[in-house]
Image (spheres, grey):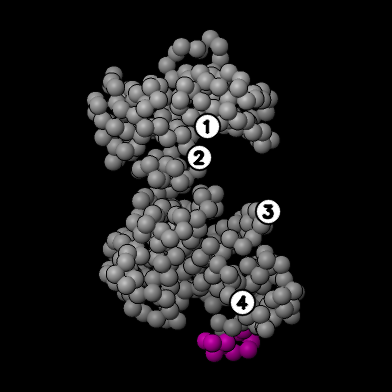
Amino acid sequence: MIEVKLDKVSKQFNGARGVENVDIHIQPGEFFTFLGPSGCGKTTTLRMIAGFYYPTEGRIMFGENNVTYTPPNKRNTGMVFQNYALFPHMTVFENIAFGLQVRKQSKAEIMDKVTRAQKLVHLDGYGDRRIDQLSGGQQQRVALARALVIEPNILLLDEPLSNLDAKLREETRLEIKRLQLELGITTIYVTHDQAEAMSMSDRIMVMKDGIVQQIGTPHDIYNRPVNRFVASFIGESNLWEGTVERMEGDSVYVRTSSDVLIAGLAANASPECRLALGSKVTVSVRPESIREAAASERGLENILAGKVLMSEFTGVSVNYVAQVGTLPIKAMFIGPGQRMRHRDEDIAFAVPKESVYFVE
């Protein structure tokens, strides 16, 4: 296991910003994910760690070794590409063995290591198969075995599940996490899929336009987003713009632009959010934190009465898109026995004060 440090790393392409001032410390054995939309700089950052790009500024450290300008073949990293980059004219065994052959290891060593790698990814007995005889999930596991067989210090994965169907993505996601825990290898994972990032990662770095927005655990990223972008990009969220109307004790009351009063706790504010009378803020409320209000609660604080615009039954939950006056609201009622309300029906929502979060 080895730690990875990026010290104020930036990359420009013909004067245009690719990545700017990335400053992170990835712990030995950590599963660390770069998350963001297409073009945000996550793959560029991964490629600088792999050595395919050199930074314009800053330095990259593997433990105590400065590898900023070390070529890729000298970094001892294993890489799994989005398209797997397998050799179609080679068998499964030959694909997995390729990196060992380049390192000029003996035939006995290669046989032993490839056999173990095949077992690790559950491909025993597939050694003689051609790549075009494998399913997408099996090809992905070949790519993973090829990256692991060289016994890298760091495993790099660039959107490795994007070509798989939903069911296979879930199965393979669990398999990658199992392998990472079993081997204890420092792993850096790139994805635009929030569910992948949230379920697999020890920590996540959220990026936008080449800039790091937030670094934290999945719990922190989801429950305490630092700005509106993170709140909207990670999962579903109601985002209502408003103005702080009054502050009483530990409570903050925001009048939304739709003239609805929302109360929250002053402690539930991002570091960048200034709470003061008259200040403009965005209220963030997760749909699953909202519940249906009882008739006896009508008129109380944070009880929002409106009409259903759309309802959806998923088996696990009933999801609503509704409107309170002109305020749009999304709610998710989880659990069995939920009554299904339909378009144009009246409904009242209770928004728990502690679930209201303020961002800038």
Amino acid type at image mark 4: Leu
Name the residue beneath numbered marker 2: 236
Q: Is mark 1 on a helix, strand or loop?
A: strand
Q: Do the residues labelled 3 and 4 touch (CB within 8 Å)?
A: no
Q: Mark 3 points at which residue?
A: 167
Label located before the other in sequence (1 or 2): 2
Q: CB atoms at circles 1 and 2 under 8 Å apart? A: yes
Q: What element carries label 2?
A: loop
Alpha-carbon neighbours of circle 1 within 10 Å: few (<14), some, or many (≥20)? many
Instruction: Name the secondary structure under disc 3.
Output: helix
Question: Residue 331 appears at what percent x and percent y?
Answer: 54, 30
Disc 1/disc 4 C-alpha distance (Å): 44 Å
Classify residue 183 as left or right of residue 117: left
Residue numbers of the magenta segment = 101-111
Cα gap from disc 1 to disc 2, whole angstroms: 8 Å
Q: Tag 1 or tag 3, which sits nearer the N-term?
A: 3
Amino acid type, residue under disc 1 in the picture: Lys
Q: In this view, does 330 lie to the left or right of 276?
A: right
- Tell me the residue that label 4 is attached to: 86
Q: Which residue is drawn at 48% across and 23% down?
A: 324
| Residue at the spot of label 1 | 330
Residue 103 magenta-drawn? yes
